[in-house]
Image (tube, rainbow, N blue to C red):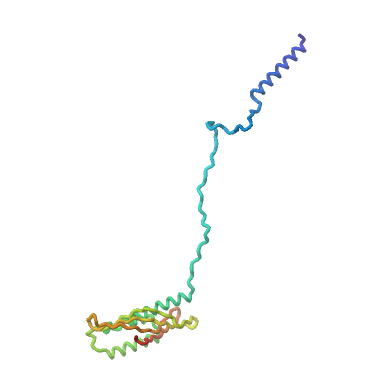
């Protein structure tokens, strides 16, 4: 055998070995149609499972605005409350009370009203009779109505409906119940509303 033939045989053998190696180790794995390419269930694969985040409630409601009471409505409410308290205190007294009901109310009176109160106390004191036997009147406000209100002028008129219980002596049956309106005129002095005049209406 010639040298040239030997070299050719060796080359063919080498090519066959390389072709066999490629076939066994390097060729792409054939996947049959329909065959899943996913790893087996028991395969040891490093798969990261996404973690579901908790849902966060979002408050889409708009913040409710604070309900603001108009200034005039608030003033009417305040004046009605003051008028009711004033009427109850002014109309509740006894012949043994030493005019405490009137003196207590002077902080809510204008100077004109204070003068009226002092004159009433003096007149009542002069006409006072025997006070050893108790007599007194208890007054309760049952209604209020605003007859007029002028903020720019600083004046208001409020009518307070009252129930009055008159008691004389210690006998339980010596009571008389009547109803009477009290008209109160308010005047604004500085930043405060004061009672400037008080007039009792007809008893019924």
Q: Splitting the image into 4 quarters, where does residue 139 fall?
A: bottom left
Q: Residue at x 32, y 87 (%)?
A: 121
Residue 192 lies, in percent from the top left, at 43, 79
Residue plotted at (50% across, 81% down): 152
Q: Tell me the quadrant of the picture where the N terminus can be found.
A: top right
Nearer the observer, 50 or 175 = 175
> Residue 167 occupies which quadrant of the picture?
bottom left
Residue 4 horizontal/vertical position (percent): 77, 13
Q: Is residue 40 left or right of residue 73?
A: right
Q: Where 51 falls versus 115 (above or below)?
A: above
Q: x, y (%) of residue 94?
A: 28, 83
On screen, residue 137 above or below 25:
below
Going by the image, does 19 lie left or right of 69? right
Q: Quadrant of residue 105?
A: bottom left
Q: Residue furthest front?
A: 34
- Is 88 or 123 nearer to us in this picture? 88
In this picture, is 44 found above or below 172? above
Task: Identify the residue at horizontal 64%, vertical 31% (top origin).
Answer: 33
Q: Position of residue 67 (x, y in %)?
A: 48, 68
**Of the pair 66 and 102, the residue shown nearer to us:** 66
- Image quarter of the C terminus: bottom left
Q: In the orientation shown, which residue stands out farthest toward the top?
A: 1
Return the residue nearer the eye: 172 or 106: 172
Is residue 133 at least partly visible in the picture? yes
């Amino acid at each position: 055998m010639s040298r040239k033939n030997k070299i050719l045989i060796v080359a063919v053998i080498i090519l066959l070995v390389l072709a066999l190696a490629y076939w066994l180790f390097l060729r792409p794995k054939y996947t049959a149609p329909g065959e899943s390419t996913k790893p087996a269930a028991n395969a040891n694969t490093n798969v990261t499972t996404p973690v579901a985040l908790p849902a966060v409630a979002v408050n889409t409601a708009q913040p409710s605005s604070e309900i603001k009471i108009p200034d005039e409505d608030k003033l009417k409410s305040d004046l009605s409350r003051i008028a009711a308290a004033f009427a109850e205190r002014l109309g509740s007294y006894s012949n043994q009370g030493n005019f405490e009901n009137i003196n207590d109310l002077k902080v809510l009176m204008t100077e004109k009203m204070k003068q009226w109160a002092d004159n009433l106390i003096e007149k009542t004191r002069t006409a006072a009779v025997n006070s050893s036997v108790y007599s007194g009147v208890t007054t309760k406000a049952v209604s209020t109505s605003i007859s007029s209100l002028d903020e720019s002028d600083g004046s208001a008129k409020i009518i307070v409906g009252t129930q009055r219980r008159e008691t004389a002596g210690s006998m339980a049956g010596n009571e008389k119940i009547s109803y009477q309106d009290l008209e109160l005129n308010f005047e604004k002095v500085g930043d405060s509303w004061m009672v400037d005049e008080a007039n009792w209406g007809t008893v019924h």
